[in-house]
Image (tube, helix red, strand yellow):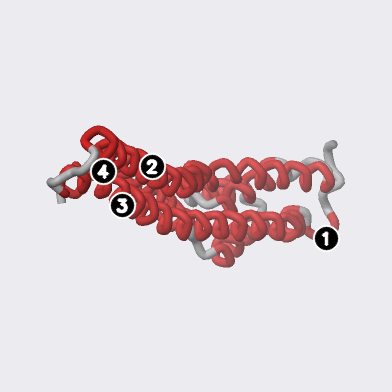
């Protein structure tokens, strides 16, 4: 295995370093999405029950116990319950928008790695081929095929390395982007439900 890596040259080492970074991003994001996954209906019911009793501090405490974007959205709604419904709606939308950077953290870097890895593989192919032709240009006919094999090996190994890294990166990038989009759509759709919960029976025409 070590010989395989050595034959790939500097470019393969760079590809491997990118693969480690990509793996770290994927694992961190998967663990993060698992951490924020909650039963939203159950959480909504608990917060609603507290609000109906007038226990707003209890409702905020329930939100603080959860790390999900939905909890952050409910917290923003409860904290601004005395304002006008239109202003509440804007603040809820702003709160939802603030969750986007947290959800997308590292995903753009993963997308960049998925694009760079095959290009680095192509670069390794070019440099390896140049080495092989350089040997031929220097010596003309080469009696020992192993002299040419070094350049050819670098060319092929870096190409394979770039593709092997890029394929899972693309798969997980698309999965994570879809996950983020789904969560953001769900947050946007919950704005009206939260307004109805916070302002029962048409309340909410309070402070601007």
For image coordinates 59% across by 45% down, the residue present is 99
For image coordinates 48% across by 41% down, the residue present is 109
Q: Residues within 10 Å of mark 3 (few under 14, many from 20)?
A: some
Whether residue 5 is visible, yes or no, is: no
Q: Position of residue 47 (x, y in %)?
A: 60, 57
Q: CA distance from mark 2 to mark 1?
A: 70 Å
For image coordinates 72% across by 46% down, the residue present is 93
Badge nearest the viewer, 4 or 1: 4
Q: Residues within 10 Å of mark 2 (few under 14, many from 20)?
A: some
Front residue of 126 and 86? 126
Q: Position of residue 176 (x, y in %)?
A: 51, 56
Q: Position of residue 174 (x, y in %)?
A: 53, 58
Residue indicated by mark 1: 201
Residue indicated by mark 3: 156
Element marked by disc 1: helix
Q: Is residue 48 above or below residue 148?
A: below
Point out the tag, 4 or 2, that comes first from the N-terminus. Answer: 2
Point out the tag, 4 or 3, that comes first from the N-terminus. Answer: 4
Q: CA distance from mark 2 to mark 3?
A: 10 Å
Q: CA distance from mark 4 to mark 2?
A: 10 Å
Relative placement, left or right, of 118 versus 132 is: right
Residue indicated by mark 2: 126
Residue indicated by mark 4: 151
Q: CA distance from mark 4 to mark 3?
A: 9 Å
Element marked by disc 3: helix
Point out the tag, 2 or 1, that comes first from the N-terminus. Answer: 2
Whether residue 114 is visible, yes or no, is: yes
Q: Position of residue 182 (x, y in %)?
A: 61, 60
Point out the tag, 4 or 1, that comes first from the N-terminus. Answer: 4
Badge nearest the viewer, 4 or 3: 4
């Amino acid at each position: 295995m070590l010989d395989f890596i050595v034959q790939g040259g500097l470019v393969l080492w760079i590809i491997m370093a990118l693969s480690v970074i990509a793996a770290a991003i994927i694992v961190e994001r998967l663990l993060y999405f698992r951490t924020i996954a909650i039963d939203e209906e159950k959480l909504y019911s608990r917060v609603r029950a507290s609000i109906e009793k007038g226990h707003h501090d209890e409702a905020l405490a329930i939100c603080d116990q959860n790390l999900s974007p939905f909890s952050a959205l409910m917290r923003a709604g409860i904290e601004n319950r005395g304002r006008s419904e239109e202003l509440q709606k804007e603040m809820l939308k702003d709160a939802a928008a603030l969750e986007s950077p947290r959800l997308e953290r590292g995903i753009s870097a993963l997308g960049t790695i998925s694009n760079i890895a095959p290009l680095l593989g192509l670069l390794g192919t070019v440099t390896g081929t140049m080495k092989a032709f350089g040997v031929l240009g220097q010596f003309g006919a080469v009696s020992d095929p192993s002299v040419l094999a070094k350049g050819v090996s670098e060319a092929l190994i870096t190409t394979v390395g770039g593709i092997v890294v890029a394929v899972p990166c693309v798969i997980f990038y698309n999965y994570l982007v879809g996950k983020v989009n789904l969560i953001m759509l769900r947050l946007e759709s919950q704005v009206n439900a939260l307004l109805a919960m916070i302002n029962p029976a048409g309340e909410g025409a309070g402070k601007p």
